[in-house]
Structures are given as structure tokens and as C-alpha cells.
Amino acid sequence: MVTYADSETQKLLRDTARSYLKDKFPVDRLYALEDGDAEIGGSDLKEFAGLGWLGLLAPESAGGGALSLLEAAVVAEEVGYAGVPAPITVSNVAAALMSGQQT
């Protein structure tokens, strides 16, 4: 049987994402988003950008994180697990394509 364990970087990404999402997107806010009574706004996007989540796959020379696809997937997984409708995956795929990386 093969087992898998997060690297230190992956663990840090997972723990940071999980903690942030739990604080910023409690269940009542998720229901409001689902019902259309709230939205992911500019301040949320600025926070995602501040965390580096919108450019995880972009090269450092372009201001990105230069992380691997697996490391970016850790953040995308946590966003999905938390049920937050955020453009994390789309922005990272776009960043990778614009920089000429293969995804």
C-alpha cells in the first residue's frame, strides 16, 4: 500500500487555507452566497491575492508563487472543501497558460 504525506510547503498551504476560509466564510455566509444575498467581492479578491492564491502557478518573475500544480491543488482542494465559490483554480490555470507553462 502506498501512503502519501504532505510536504512542509503543502502542509503550510493547507493549514493557512483551512484557517482563513473557516474564519472568513462561516456557514451563514456560505448560505448567503448560495441564496444570492451576498457575493465574493473585491475585498475578498484582494485578500485572495494577498495570500498569493490567484497566482500560485505564475512564475516569480511575474509576481507569482512559482508553485507546482500539486501545491496549487492543495489550495483549490481546501477552497472546494469549504464550499467557497472563489476563482482560485481559474486564475491559476490562466496564469499558467499566460506564462507558457503546461498544466
Image (cartoon, rainbow, N blue to C red):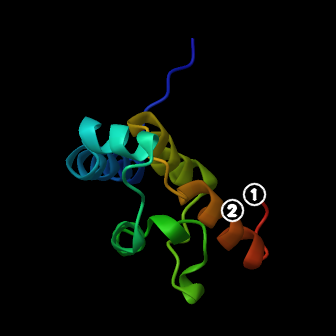
Residue that numbered label 1 is attached to: 103
Which of the pair 49/100 is nearer the observer? Answer: 49
Farthest residue in the top direction? 1
Question: Which quadrant would the C terminus be assigned to in this image?
Answer: bottom right
Q: Which residue is mark 2?
A: 93
Percent of width and height locating residue 11? 35, 45
- When asked about the image quadrant of residue 92, the answer is bottom right
Q: Nearer the viewer, residue 92 or 64?
A: 92
Residue 90 left/right relative to 10:
right
Q: Nearer the viewer, residue 7 or 64?
A: 64
Residue at point 48% right, 45% down? 74
> What's the CA distance linking mark 2 and mark 1?
7 Å
Q: Nearer the viewer, residue 58 or 2?
A: 58
Q: Taking 64 as reference, is 82 above or below it?
A: above
Q: Residue at x 46, y 50 (%)?
A: 75
Q: Is residue 49 above or below residue 23?
A: below
- At label 1, counting other C-alpha atoms closer than 10 Å, the crowd grade (few under 14, some 14-19, many 20 or more) is few
Under mark 2, the amino acid is Val
Q: Residue at x 46, y 64 (%)?
A: 53
User: Which picture quadrant has residue 59?
Assistant: bottom right
Q: Amino acid at mark 1?
A: Thr
Q: Earlier in the sequence, mark 2 or mark 1?
A: 2
**Of helix, strand and loop, which one carries label 2?**
helix
Question: Residue 91 appears at what percent x and percent y?
Answer: 61, 66
Foreground tag (2 vs 1): 2
Labels 2 and 1 touching (C-beta < 8 A): yes
Q: Secondary structure at mark 1?
A: loop
Please name the residue shown 58% across and 86% down the image: 62
